[in-house]
Structure formats: structure tokens, C-alpha cells
Image (cartoon, rainbow, N blue to C red):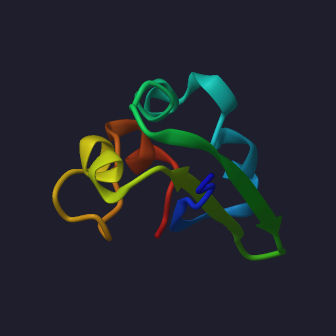
Amino acid sequence: MDQSMIGKIWRGETLPGRAEAYPDGSKHPGDADFAGTTGNRGGFIMRRVTSDKAEFLLLTLWDEFDSIASFAGDELERARYYPEDDEVLTL
């Protein structure tokens, strides 16, 4: 049985004082879109806060490239952002 998956990595930054505001678990509108996409296998959010920034790394797991395109669009390497992201993210 083939258990291979495709991983997609996204990185973002915010100010240290905003680290708790993003991402906010199931409250972010992208979470429902992500979880409801066929071929999605889950993901991991990692966060590192220093004195001058909070860095986020999101690793999402997918069955195939078509599944990623269903969520992110035809430009697979491009991140999918939501209006709420503009309020928190600096990069």
C-alpha cells in the first residue's frame, strides 16, 4: 500500500505581541476550508517567538497535487491568504 503524501510549507511572521492572535485554532476561516478539502491529510503549526518577531511554519499534508489546487488554486507554491491575515501578519 502506497502511503506517500505531498507536503506544502507556508511561513509567516507577526509581532511578538500578536503571536497569540495568529493562528487561532478552529477560529481562522481557512481551517474549515483546509479541513474540508478532499485529499487533505492534516497539518502541523509550529511557532517560535523571539524578542522581535513571532514566526509561524505551517506544514500541510496532501494526497496529490490536484488536492492542493482545490484548496490553494492553480499556483500551488503560492499561499492562500484571508482578509483576517492582514490584521496580524507582517510577512
Q: Is residue 35 above or below residue 22?
A: above
Q: Position of residue 58 (x, y in %)?
A: 61, 58
Q: Position of residue 45 (x, y in %)?
A: 70, 52
Q: Is residue 30 above or below residue 45?
A: above
Report the front residue among 4 and 22. Answer: 4
Q: Position of residue 70 (x, y in %)?
A: 26, 42
Q: Is residue 32 left or right of residue 43?
A: left
Report which quarter residue 13 is drawn in: bottom right
Q: Residue at x 34, y 49 (%)?
A: 81
Looking at the image, how many numbered discs can be counted on the residues? 0
Q: Residue at x 46, y 35 (%)?
A: 34
Q: Residue at x 66, y 63 (%)?
A: 56
Q: Residue furthest left?
A: 74
Q: Is residue 88 left or right of residue 23?
A: left
Q: Is residue 71 left or right of residue 47?
A: left
Q: Residue at x 46, y 50 (%)?
A: 63
Report the front residue among 82 and 51. Answer: 82
